Amino acid sequence: MIGLAYYNATPTTLDLNGPFLKFTSEPSSQTVDDAATHAGNVSSLIQVSYNGYPVRGYLYYPTTPNTGQSLDVVVLYHGTITSAGVSPADAASTFISIALNKVNLKDKLVFSVAYPQDFIPLWQANPALPAIQFPGLDYPNLYLGDNIVYAEAALLWVKNELNSFLSSNNIPKTVNKVYTFGHSQGAYLVHRLNTLHTVDGVISNAPGPIDLLTRCSGVNQTETGSCNKIGLGIGLTSTDPDAYNSRSLKSFLSGTLSPTLFTQALDDDTADEFGTPQVANMKDIMQAGLSTCTDCAAITFNYYETGGHDAFVTNTYLQNDIRSFVGAVGAGIATFVGIATAEFKTNPEATNTGYISYKWYENDTALEDGTNVAGSGTTTLTLSNLSNPEDTGKNLVLRVNYVPSAYQTTSPVTAGTARSTDYASNAPLDIANAAVLTVNPIITINTQPSDDTVAQTQNATFTVDASASDSSDLTYQWNVNGSPVSDSATVSGSTTPTLTISSPDVSTSTVSVTVSHPTAGNSPVTSDSATWAVVSARQILNYELVSGDGGFYGTGSQNLFDGPITFSGNSQIVGRSTVFYAPEKDLRVRATMYGGAGVGRNGNRGGEGGSAVFEFTIYKNEEYTLKLGAATPPTGGTNGGGASAYLYRKGRLIVALGGGGGAGSRGRGGDGGGIGIAGETGRGRYAGRGGSVYSTGTLPTIGVFPGGSVYGGVNWSAADGGRVSGCTIGGYYNYISPCSDIGVSQFRTAAGSIISQTASILRGFKSGLGHRNNGGNASGDNGGGASGATGGDAGIGDGSGGGGGSGYSSGEVTVISTRLGGGTSRDSFITIEVIN
């Protein structure tokens, strides 16, 4: 019997004439299954638009059959991003994981919104990313609160377009009610949205900023990113306080349209510059202000002892309140029953007109009826929405007492005959042994295996992400066409979360995994089936768009059997590389390649870029890199020198084509050279010479910039052209010789960091120095030289044209044709087609 800290008041001297309490039925220990019995799928990042604004986010939809078709949707808005390397999509992914696996909203549709914020460390470090991830976003002029239009677009897309999206993606669900749920800055947004659009309910956890003016005062004006940005762009708190007040939640304390649940942990230590904590602002500003609102929908403020700013992640009471607010299903129900009697032994005249009181305790704490608790003062206690590990192992104790009452000894009643039942002689009485609550864990498949199509003998990989609610280990068994498989020469990981399998035969199979746990209530669980397609080795060419400074611009794939592929210079991103490789088999290909033309002037044409047709083999899983010059910004010399085109096999330059020289005011530019052809000299009295030619395979490893500089101190006004490096010279790879392979790796930046979205293949390209921008530089009305294997010189007087760059081959390609000029586009480009 466990000791209890709480006792009902009873007389210190017991009357032996009172009744004697005893239990006729004591509660027994109970074992139930975890409440979170639903499973479902999370989509890849959705990228749509509404009212001209990009909408980004992840959608969860339940797949268990008992959830029904018409479902409520909870729209999530994540908190402020403060960690380096985290994008809005990452934050949305994290929030949906919490909503599903912590708050347990798995019987709902859930859409987690990725929305732009005014100050994101990742975006500060990569200024090109905001417009890529949110096209049209004016990030430099986006201040806190301006993102309400993006939050609004996402909500309206859910309300007006989600049903169509579900239907078009063969998801057999429809939208019923719509709730919004935000945390921190996300809670700020959902409250503001609540003054614009009606939904069925709003959950606002630790919303902020409540008082932006105070938060941004003092040193925070310059030391806090958001505050500093407003101060620099709009004005300081001292000069333009309205800019801060208008963005504060304290300015939106009327006109709410939908019922709202505000949740706040009392130990949230978030504070402003003057030490005013989040909790004080919540109570003194938000709650006080909304309590006097005359045009607001119903508002509830709930406070919790623990959990800090992110209490919704850990505080089970808060999580229960969220589930209750949105009507999430709570399984996991346990019922405990105890019955006692009061027996009179020494006072036969007494009538048993008193009654027995009941009180249930959990681990020494008196229970009270409320969320997930019913019958705490009765013979029957019901606990609902139980989960593992939070609720398992709890001890339930029933305590009884006897409450006496008056009675009469005669009838009819005469004076002096009133009596009172005596107190029980053994009160209060607890059950002999606590009833123990055991909540079986459940298995949840967080990510289902995905389809995989591979060529014969190539490895297909299938992965499952599963977890047990008690965090204990799971066991796995992979199945092919419904039958278990074992590790062999073609199978590995058959009893792990990741299966690797190959086959020499063209075939189509189903792959699933059975996940087991010794005590889970839903064990074993078998995943959805994925399709494993083995096809004839195809003529696949994969490509990656990256830059040496860490930029990642996407990947793609082309089956060259279906047609050729063309890559061209990019006119927006300086330094971008196109990496391609053959993932399934060696490919013999023919390439048609052009250098870029120079700029024309005063009716004088710029020189044409050199051109060539050649054949080569793209070896399986080897890296080939294109550096294709662009018209804007120019990659030739200044004053209109044309763009060159370079092709590398790993670290070695195997083909270079020269760009066309820029025209001067009185003479045209020289044409660029194809493979093995020198650049043409420009026209005019002081025309720039064309780049000289190096015979096959003789280009020196280390190049030079215009003016002859190898490394630093480049003279960018030098008129004489430089020379490209025969192999790449990367800053991070200085310990590896320029022409040597790196080994199997993902793409690394010049600083050495890995771009994680790239493939692990045999690489040798080293980001950094390459001497590719080597055209001579001109000024005034003279034409610039073009870059190439050797850059053309610039015109140096009398409006003369610049020289074209030269072409080159390392000897690793078979030249079909080559010529001077032929490239009329300002951007260089290449077309690759398969010939076997």
Image: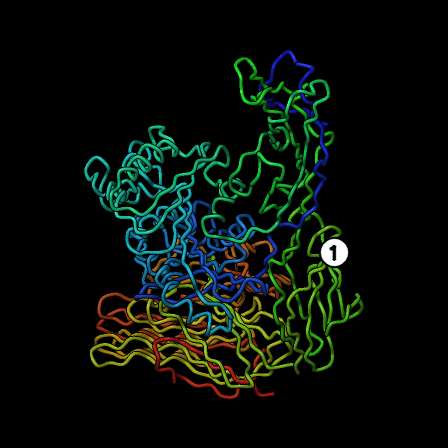
Q: Quadrant of the C terminus?
A: bottom right
Among all residues in the image, which is located at the extreme front?
A: 412
Q: Position of residue 807 (x, y in %)?
A: 46, 77
Q: Is residue 548 above or below residue 202?
A: below
Q: Quadrant of the N terminus?
A: top right
Which corner quadrant of the image does residue 126 belong to? bottom left
> How many labels, in total?
1
**Residue at mark 1:** 475
Camera-nearest residue between 575 and 203 = 203
Camera-nearest residue between 722 and 448 = 448
Residue found at x 35% / y 33%: 283
Q: Please state if 409 lies on the left or on the right of 497 as rendered.
A: left
The answer to whether residue 274 of the structure is visible from this angle is yes
Which corner quadrant of the image does residue 72 belong to? bottom left
Q: Position of residue 180 (x, y in %)?
A: 40, 53
Q: Position of residue 52 (x, y in %)?
A: 30, 66
Camera-nearest residue between 313 and 555 = 313
Q: Amino acid at mark 1?
A: Thr
Q: Please state if 548 lies on the left or on the right of 55 as rendered.
A: right
Check disc 1: other Cα within 10 Å, few if <14, some if 14-19, many if 20+.
some
Q: Position of residue 143 (x, y in %)?
A: 29, 49
Camera-nearest residue between 232 and 240 = 240
Q: Secondary structure at mark 1?
A: strand
Residue found at x 60% / y 60%: 447
The answer to whether residue 721 of the structure is visible from this angle is no
Q: How was this image coloured?
A: rainbow
Q: Is residue 445 above or below residue 580?
A: above
